[in-house]
Image (cartoon, rainbow, N blue to C red):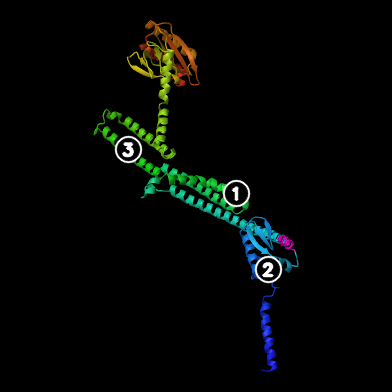
Amino acid sequence: MTPCSDALVALAAGLFSIAPGASSSPNATGEVEVFDRTAFVIRAPRGEISAAQRAKQASERLESVLEEQVEGELSVNLHGDEATFWLGDRILFSLTPADAEAEGERSLERFAEQRKEVLESFLRAERRRATLKHGVLNLGLLVFLGFLSWLLMKQVRCWAAKLRVWVESTDPDSVGFLSKVLGDEKLRGLAVILLHGAQFFAYAAIAYLFLVGSLSLFDAGRPLREQLTRWAAEPFLSLAERVSAGVPTLLLLFLLGVVMQAGWHAINLTSERVASGRAHLGAVRPEFVPSVRLLLRLGLILASLLLLVALLTGPSGELFAVAGVVVLAGLGLALLPLAANMALGIETTLNRRFRLGDLVRLPDGRQGRLVGLELLHLRLLEPNGTEVLVPHLLGLRQPLRRLPADGGLEAELRVSAALFPAQVRERLETTARRFAERHTAGEPRVELVEVGAYECRYCVTIPAAAPELHGELLFALWSGLSEARGSESERSGGDVAAV
């Protein structure tokens, strides 16, 4: 080998030995880019990790925290020869003294503070840019949701109008179950009302969804959205929880409905057989069947309602206790009039308002002798021998009058206001006087008790007259007024009603 060839080989070896060192030059840098915008530059490698690789890792972490909108304060943690940058609880990257020296700064602490200021400025700018971008996008979505809601409401109104036209134009003579059902005017009106309610409910649901979607687009509206969602969802969630936990109750309700339907059919069938004479039911005669059937139906409905209330409102495990409380409350309300009647009977008996043998006049004009004073009622004996039971509660609505001990008659008459009061009073006094002379009674009295727009009420009292003459007295007074009715009574109708 010649000396010239030896020199060429040595030169080639030197060139190949220098090439790898050039590719790993310490002057290689890496730009930290976030969304195609440069935040800062890393100029120094760290161990086997090049500056470009470090810059790529920092870029990915910064993009991640910006996309996830991580909140928190940017901080620097100095530990030995390393400055770690944190955003909230997320690590972004670390700097070393080599990075400070590459930028011409000898102190790592001062270099970290400078990088912190640069990074804070960059993050503020990026957050403002992201907020503006999201605001424009959310505004577009809001307009789209509003347009979609308007289209849905318009479609719901169109469907509701078509259904109402179909319901109102249904021919009852056509074949089909719906046609027969909607042929009834009442059911058709109910269907129209239900359609209006369904349309209103659909409008409310669309408006609710639009409101929830609109509030979800903006940070300021999210707390209100959560409250609105909780307010609207809690009743349904509670209902779903009660339904899921109350499957046995639902089964009991189903059985209750079956038993009630079977009982209803049994009552109808039995009452029809007893009414037609094909069956006998103890002391129930055919003429009592409608009343007994009504009582049985009411009892069945009341028992079903009491069990229904106990099932729906009672806590689990205490069904019979709640049912007992409900039954007692229902019985207490049902027995309230009876208890009030007994209380009045006790008060009447203790205060001795009436005595046996008193002549008592009822609000309807009948009168009789008191032959019994019991806890629930008074027993009166009318002149014709009929015994009348008068509940004590009747005295709360209208007064019971005790007539004088020497007997006597009292009659009330309602006369048309078109007749002259003086003429009516004169005719009543004349008729009552004749009646008293004929039956050897005392001097009669005539009083004008009430004056109304259409009629006047007169009270005629004849002392020492037998109670059995009450009907005869009314007939005599009516006959006397009929004779004096005259032309004025004929113009105004002139009818006289004796009560």
Residue 67: image location, x then y, percent: 62, 60
- Mark 2 and mark 1 lie on one chain; the one further toward the N terminus is 2
Disc 1 marks a residue whose amino acid type is: Pro
Residue 31 tag number? 2
Query: Which span of residues is magenta-colored?
Result: 107-116
- Say which element carries label 1: helix
Which one is closest to the eye, mark 3 or mark 1? Answer: 1
The verdict on residue 400 being magenta is: no
- Mark 3 and mark 1 lie on one chain; the one further toward the N terminus is 1
Residues at marks 2 and 1 touching, judged by CB atoms closer than 8 Å: no
Disc 3 marks a residue whose amino acid type is: Gly
As measured in the structure, the alpha-carbon distance from the residue carrying label 2 to the one carrying label 1 is 40 Å
Residue depicted at x 67% and y 86%: 12
Q: Quadrant of residue 380?
A: top left
Residue 263 tag number? 3
- Mark 3 and mark 2 lie on one chain; the one further toward the N terminus is 2
As measured in the structure, the alpha-carbon distance from the residue carrying label 3 to the one carrying label 2 is 88 Å
Towards the viewer: 288 or 452: 288
Residue at the farthest bottom position: 2
Residue depicted at x 68% and y 87%: 10
Which one is closest to the eye, mark 2 or mark 1? Answer: 2
Residue named by callout 1: 223
Residues at marks 3 and 1 touching, judged by CB atoms closer than 8 Å: no
Disc 2 marks a residue whose amino acid type is: Glu
Which one is closest to the eye, mark 3 or mark 2? Answer: 2
Q: How many marks?
A: 3
